[in-house]
Amino acid sequence: MKDTFKHQGLRQQLVNVLKTKGITNTNVLKAVGKIPRHLFMDSSFLDHAYQDKAFPIAADQTISQPYTVAFQSELLEITPGHTVLEIGTGSGYQTAVLCELGARVYSIERQQELFKKTSKFLPKLGYRAKHLIFGDGYKGLPEQAPFDSIIVTAGAPFVPKPLLSQLKHDGGRLVIPVGDSGKAQIMTLFIRKGPKSFEQYEFGEFKFVPLLEDKN
Ligand code: SAH
């Protein structure tokens, strides 16, 4: 688990790439500059870890493109102490970004292999999510709701109602890529304004692995 000057230099270049692509939140940029992304990937991909690209991880899943991670993180508008639910723990990279932003993070993963691997790995890097959960993200986490924000890191064919209902009423934010698998998804932000009122904004096309129905 080495983090060399070379890695650190490549990370700074990645931060600059994200800036030129329009990421402005300094805390998000700092997090990307700090987190050793190469350690979240299989070793054969080490050389590619600081390109702005998604890459395969275990169980046929991907670690999201850094730009996508930064874009979604920015939309969450996290301040320290916020309670955040992540759907799709995957490699744990996005989870680490949320921890760096000072969030109390709950994260759900439905692939047992990834759940086990990432549960062991994150604490080794010093990232302590409040709770990593093996389960189905479509249901959210009612026992810990309401959340300041919820981030979905897989492409959802529709917006799961439980996620909307688990947002805080006064400004809770859901960031979710919506669209059928095989196609691009539309990055969508919901802001809760009251028990039944939500504002909705769309931010263009992104490509994610699909949010799969419960298999357990
Ligand atoms: N945030 C991750 C992205 C991983 S890809 C990272 O940066 O590495 C999306 C993840 O969502 C995969 O790990 C996949 O197994 C998971 N996933 C898919 N459907 C899910 C569901 N219904 N509930 C929870 N996780 C799910």
Image (tube, rainbow, N blue to C red):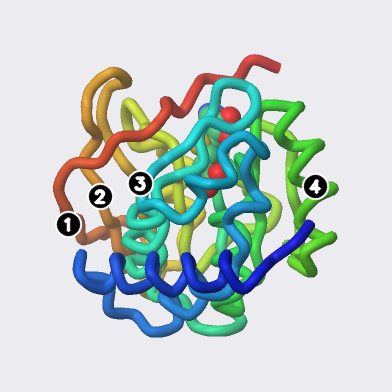
Name the residue that disc number 3 marks: 176
Mark 4 closeness class: few <14, some 14–19, many ≥20 residues within 10 Å: some
Of 113 and 32, the residue lying toward us = 32
Using the numbered discs, state the Cα–Cα distance from disc 1 to disc 3 in whole angstroms.
11 Å
- Per the image, the residue denoted by label 4 is 119
- The residue under label 2 is 188
Counting from the top left corner in percent of width and height, residue 211 is at 46, 28
Residues at marks 2 and 3 touching, judged by CB atoms closer than 8 Å: yes
In the picture, the quarter occupied by the C terminus is: top right
Q: Amino acid at mark 2?
A: Thr
Which residue is under mark 1?
201
| Number of residues whose C-alpha sits closer than 10 Å to that of mark 2, classed few (under 14), some (14–19) or many (20 or more) | some
Q: Amino acid at mark 1?
A: Tyr
Q: Secondary structure at mark 3?
A: strand
User: Mark 4 or 1, which is nearer the eye?
Assistant: 4
Indicate the quadrant where residue 128 lies. bottom right
Q: Earlier in the sequence, mark 3 or mark 4?
A: 4
On the rendering, which quadrant does ligand 1 occupy?
Answer: top right
Amino acid tagged 4: Ser
Question: Answer yes or no: do the residues labelled 4 and 2 have beta carbons within 8 Å?
Answer: no
Q: Position of residue 148 (x, y in %)?
A: 49, 69
Is there a contact, CB below 8 Å, between mark 1 and mark 2? yes
User: Which residue is at 39% across, 65% downward?
Assistant: 14
In the rendered view, tell whether residue 50 sits above or below residue 82.
above
**What quarter of the picture does the N terminus occupy?**
bottom right
Element type at marker 2? Answer: strand
* Between discs 4 and 1, the one toward the N terminus: 4
Residue at 77%, 64% in the rendered image: 125
The mark nearer the N terminus, 1 or 3, is 3
- Left or right relative to 8: residue 180: left
Alpha carbons under labels 1 and 2: distance apart: 6 Å
